[in-house]
Amino acid sequence: MKRIIVILLIVFAGTYATAQKAEIFSPGGIAIKGYDAVAFFKRSKPVKGVDKYSYQWNNVTWLFSDEENRAAFKGSPEKYAPQYGGYCAYGISEGHKAPTETDTWSVINDKLYFNYNKKVKEMWQKDEENHIKIADQKWPAIKNAE
């Protein structure tokens, strides 16, 4: 049993490290944990995407809930893709990549942001404008770093 736990920890650590190196936060090769990026804008809520409406962009699979949303993303992926590759916006403003939870989403000035968890989102919300300004400056230097 101990051996199985050690193996699982090694596999998880390797997966996490790979996700942190990638420009897009995409555990298992799927962006936004399989949620429809366009739905955050059009439906104002997280909506799970389906394999039938998948699309490859930036070496990552994006899933959508319907053909209309997939077509919208295809036509303008930069408009709908989350800022900072879907990594924690607050973390980027602090100079590092961190994974995110889908329920921490927010759309600010027509841009999609995620945070590590709800507590971090609360910190982010206290000064979003400043955090965005700082993160925008830091992102180019850290987007391809570990």
Image: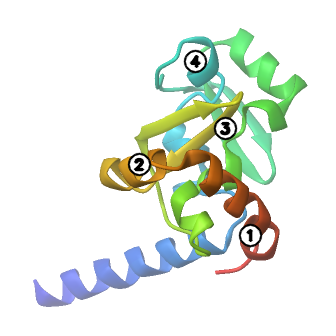
Disc 4/disc 2 C-alpha distance (Å): 26 Å
Please tell me whether residue 26 is drawn above or below residue 41 in the rendered image.
Answer: below
Disc 4/disc 3 C-alpha distance (Å): 10 Å
Which is nearer the N-term, disc 2 or disc 1?
2
Please tell me whether residue 83 is drawn above or below residue 141 in the rendered image.
Answer: above
Mark closer to the observer (4, 2): 2
Q: Residue furthest left?
A: 1
Please tell me which residue lies in front, 72 or 123.
123
Please tell me whether residue 18 is drawn above or below residue 110 in the rendered image.
Answer: below
The amino acid on which the numbered mark 3 sits, given as a three-letter code, is Trp
Residue assigned mark 4: 65
Q: Do the residues under discs 2 and 1 have CB atoms within 8 angstroms?
A: no
Disc 4/disc 1 C-alpha distance (Å): 32 Å
Mark closer to the observer (3, 1): 1
Label 2: which secondary element: helix
Residue assigned mark 2: 121
Disc 2/disc 1 C-alpha distance (Å): 19 Å
Which is nearer the N-term, disc 3 or disc 1?
3
Identify the image quadrant of the N terminus: bottom left
Which is nearer the N-term, disc 4 or disc 2?
4
Which is nearer the N-term, disc 4 or disc 1?
4
Identify the image quadrant of the C terminus: bottom right
Q: Do the residues under discs 3 and 1 have CB atoms within 8 angstroms?
A: no
Which is nearer the N-term, disc 2 or disc 3?
3
Are there few (<14), some (14-19), or many (20+) residues within 10 Å of tag 2?
many
Residue assigned mark 1: 138
Give the x, y percent position of residue 37: 63, 30
The amino acid on which the numbered mark 1 sits, given as a three-letter code, is Lys
Give the x, y percent position of residue 90: 52, 59
Are there few (<14), some (14-19), or many (20+) residues within 10 Å of tag 1?
some
The amino acid on which the numbered mark 4 sits, given as a three-letter code, is Ser
